[in-house]
Amino acid sequence: MESLLPKLRAGNTVRYVSPATTPDRERVFQATEVRESWGFKVELARTLFESTPNEKLVLLERFELGEIG
């Protein structure tokens, strides 16, 4: 079955968000280095490490509405 989503390619941007829990910083930075070595641009959501559950919910709602990419 073929995916309906486009394939990621070097030069694409990936953004890390964490809608539920706060991720381990070291693991995020390690994963970021790997993705960058593959040619991706990596962005970290401003609420990734320090935010309340409500702030994370607002971010997800804005993403779903297309207000942020």
Image (cartoon, grey):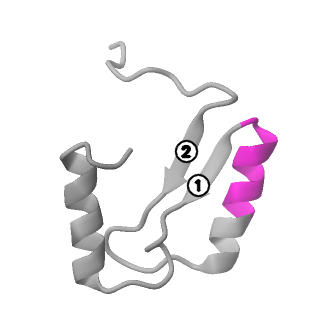
Q: Residues within 10 Å of mark 1 (few under 14, many from 20)?
A: few
- Which numbered marker is on residue 43? 1
Q: Looking at the image, which is closer to me, 21 or 14?
A: 14
Q: Earlier in the sequence, mark 2 or mark 1?
A: 2
Q: Are marks 2 and 1 in contact (CB under 8 Å)?
A: yes
31 left or right of 16?
Answer: right
x then y, percent, for residue 56: 30, 73
Q: Looking at the image, which is closer to me, 19 or 62?
A: 62
- The mark total stands at 2
Q: Residues within 10 Å of mark 2 (few under 14, many from 20)?
A: some
Specify whether residue 68 is painted magenta.
no
Q: Amino acid at mark 1?
A: Glu
Q: Is residue 5 above or below residue 56?
A: above
Segment colored magenta: 30-39
x then y, percent, for residue 47: 43, 74
Give the quadrant of residue 39.
top right
Give the quadrant of residue 43.
bottom right
Name the residue tied to disc 2. 14
Q: In the rendered view of the protein, which quadrant contains the N terminus?
A: top left
